[in-house]
Image (cartoon, rainbow, N blue to C red):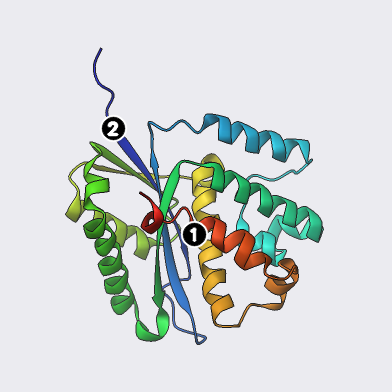
Amino acid sequence: MAKKESILSIFIDESGDFGELKEKPAYYLVTLVFHDQSEDISDNVKRLEKSIKNSGFDIEYIHSAPIIRREDVFKNYTLDERRSLIYKILNFTTSLPIVYATVAINRNTSENKIKLSGRISREITKIFQKYSKFFNKFEHLILYYDGGQSELSAILSAVFSAHFDNVEFRKAEPQNYRLLQTADFICTIELLKIKRDENRLSKSETCFFYKPQELKKTFIKAIDKKNIDKSK
């Protein structure tokens, strides 16, 4: 029996944009979620799907920032219902055999597209270099991104192609991949961590995480355990 090819799936999500800097401080984040395809997560996904269905939610996917800000389809749900959804994606994420890395760029030091593109490229390259042993274990890499920002798509294509000759790029819709929703969730929490440290959480964010220390102790600490820096 032939040995099965070792494949690493990489799911990408971002926060921020390449447009004109309209506020200070501002950040651009890119989160990369890494999943070894030999680690089966079908049961994890089934439990999440069942939990969502049993709770009566009629949504395509869990989109974390709009849930917190009560935007889009989530404006029709109460605070308790939206908090329930966030806890579902939290529990799903912490149960997964994944690790992640997030690149966070202060836009005040990268005001224009050229500087921002360069910083993102360099920071992602540092991840490849620091964890080369991890990446070299895999015979094939598959990168999933929804293509929401053409600038980031170009950066990902250039940086990954420059470092790996075994990478495949796939445009993927978040509603079809729970791990893209996980990347979205982690990226949201990483941004909230920055905003909390800088004491500038918005009114909607403060109202959503209304329990003392909930954001730090329940969400930030739990997600940080999945950071590739903490992996063995």
- Give percent across and percent down for residue 30: 41, 63
Mark 2 element type = loop
Q: Amino acid at mark 1?
A: Asp
Closest to the observer, 217 or 73? 217
Task: Pick whichever, 192 or 63, lies toward us.
Answer: 192
Identify the residue shown where x is 79% and y is 60%. Answer: 79
- CA distance for labels 2 and 1: 26 Å
Q: Which residue is mark 1?
A: 224
Question: Is 13 or 51 nearer to us in this picture?
Answer: 51
Residue shown at the point (39%, 74%) measured from the top left: 105
Relative to 88, is 223 on the left or the right?
A: left
The quadrant of the picture occupied by the N terminus is: top left
As drawn, is 111 to the left or to the right of 69?
left
Label 1: which secondary element: helix
Check residue 118 in the rendering and tell me which mark sits there, or answer none: none
Total numbered badges shown on the rendered structure: 2
In x, y percent, where is residue 98? 44, 45
Question: As shown in the figure, which amino acid type bears the numbered disc 2?
Answer: Ser
Asked whether the viewer can see residue 130, the reply is yes
From the top left corner, tell me how far across and down residue 46 is, in percent.
61, 31
Among the two numbered marks 2 and 1 on one chain, the one whose residue lies closer to the N terminus: 2
Residue 6's tag is 2
Q: Which picture quadrant has residue 118?
A: bottom left
Residue toward you, 61 or 25:
25
The picture places residue 62, in percent across and down from the top left corner, at 63, 50
* Residue found at the far front of this picture: 232
User: What residue sits 35% from the left and 58% below the top?
Assistant: 153
Please indicate whether residue 24 sits to the left or right of residue 58 in the image.
left
Residue at screen point 74% across, 51% down: 84
Q: Residues within 10 Å of mark 2 (few under 14, many from 20)?
A: few
53, above or below 5, in the image: below
